[in-house]
Amino acid sequence: MIIVFSHAHPSISKGGAEVSAYTLYKGLLALGQKAAFVAMCPEAQLAKVRFETPDEHTIAYQPARYDHYFHLAEPSQVGAMAELVQALQPSAMVFHHFLFIGINTVRRLAERFAVPSVLVLHEFLAICHHHGQMVTRPKKKLCTSAGAVHCAGCFPEHDAEEFNVRKQSFLSAMMLMTRLVSPSHFLASRFIEWGIPKRQLAVIENGLAGYVPPPPTADKPPPLRAASGLPWQRSEAAPRAVQTVFGYFGQINPFKGIDQILDALDLLPASVAGAATIRVRIHGNVVGVTEEFQKRFEDAQAKDPRIEYVGPYNNQDVHQLMQACDYIVMASKWWENSPVVIQEAYAAERPVIVPGLGGMAEKVTEGVSGHHFKPNDPEDLARVLLKCASRPGARKKMQLPRPLTAAQMAKRYLVAAGLGPTDGPHANKPGQPRPQAEGIH
């Protein structure tokens, strides 16, 4: 029994980490592995959880009692987790985050159950107390390294010694892991600089649930599900106006850079190259924004016909929604690690426009699978949008990578944990060293 732990259940929360954790779980089942999915859930939301399979479990917690600085769960929660794991009798454990699970829970379970254990790093939360963004506080400047004195400058309510204790708490638990997994080389490099031995890190891309790679002779990948008659769904063969549609997908919050997209549009003329036009279609929830931003966003929708705010979307519909766009655009202001939006865009055969930051720049090859623009530079983003709109046929000539399926992702995790493959030239034989991290030198 391989247990996959998640900081939330995807039936009530659709963040990248919990979706990735569930994708791994479904991938293990697809490989014929016996697996269980254990998700943390705020006590007040337990009634909203919906299970798809028999071996899914929740552990309730009180958000107000979770220590967000040291990331410690309360003792009763740690005990409940240990009892459940004891009943499940795991052969391996994968912690797809430590948030709400508690780094003390990770340590306790690793010490008590002598089985291969993997911890997945989704952002810089262990390194950076500022939501794991590695962005300074309060000026919100990009931060390139962490240090106790430097971090105490961002959070004067905690002194440098507290930051040292926090770091050692994380490191002591991480050293108990069979392997740490990062979905990007960029994130892995930051953790190596922070103190994790590179031999303990593996880079494994997130898989995409429901994705079926096209056969080698096919020109187009099949849709994730049957066409649903969604708005803006179009046929590539149908005649269309000379219009380039840029789609934004994801939360609309202070770190995601929607303001940069609005700034870029302000710099662009209403039309380019004669009849060619630009349209920006924004999909997602508005979360944690200021009143000033909210007003600007609403005013932009009212005054600029190029902007269309679609609102929240069901993840099952993302394939069709993306295919109604020409490019997918991201404008994040922090070092995003491995946004699932990029994988979804590639599955929908759409190139991606990203700032030259972190895992975003790593996942998108300039001119091949999309375009880069200078971080926090609306003028350069405007330049890229204009270039794409002026060359409407360029998108179809790009060479986009294929995402991993859930099963392909699960196979790589089995190797990282020392559990596979079980035969063939790459088999993990008794007495052999664990496989080295992918691409970390």
Image: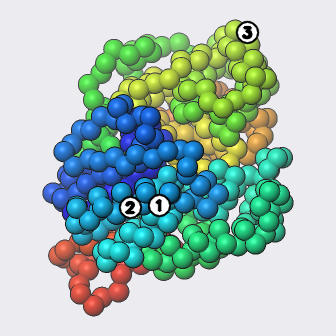
Q: Which mark is residue 303?
A: 3
Mark before the other along the chain sequence, 2 or 3? 2
Residue 363 at what x, y percent from top left?
Answer: 53, 52
Q: Amino acid at mark 3?
A: Lys
Q: Is residue 371 above or below residue 415?
A: above
Q: Is residue 169 visible?
A: yes
Residue 32 at what x, y percent from top left?
Answer: 15, 57
Q: Is residue 411 above or below residue 219?
A: below
Q: Which mark is residue 44?
A: none
Residue 103 at what x, y percent from top left?
Answer: 51, 64
Q: Please tell me whether mark 2 sits on a helix, a strand or a loop.
A: helix
Q: Marks 1 and 3: CB-CB under 8 Å?
A: no
Q: Please tell me whether mark 3 sits on a helix, a strand or a loop.
A: helix
Q: Amino acid at mark 1?
A: Pro
Mark 1 and mark 2: Cα distance apart in space: 6 Å
Residue 438 at what x, y percent from top left?
Answer: 44, 71
Q: Please tell me whether mark 1 sits on a helix, a strand or a loop.
A: helix
**Would you name the residue on which mark 1 appears?**
75
Determine crowd level at label 2: few under 14, some 14-19, many 20+ residues with C-alpha closer than 10 A.
Answer: some
Q: Amino acid at mark 2?
A: Gly
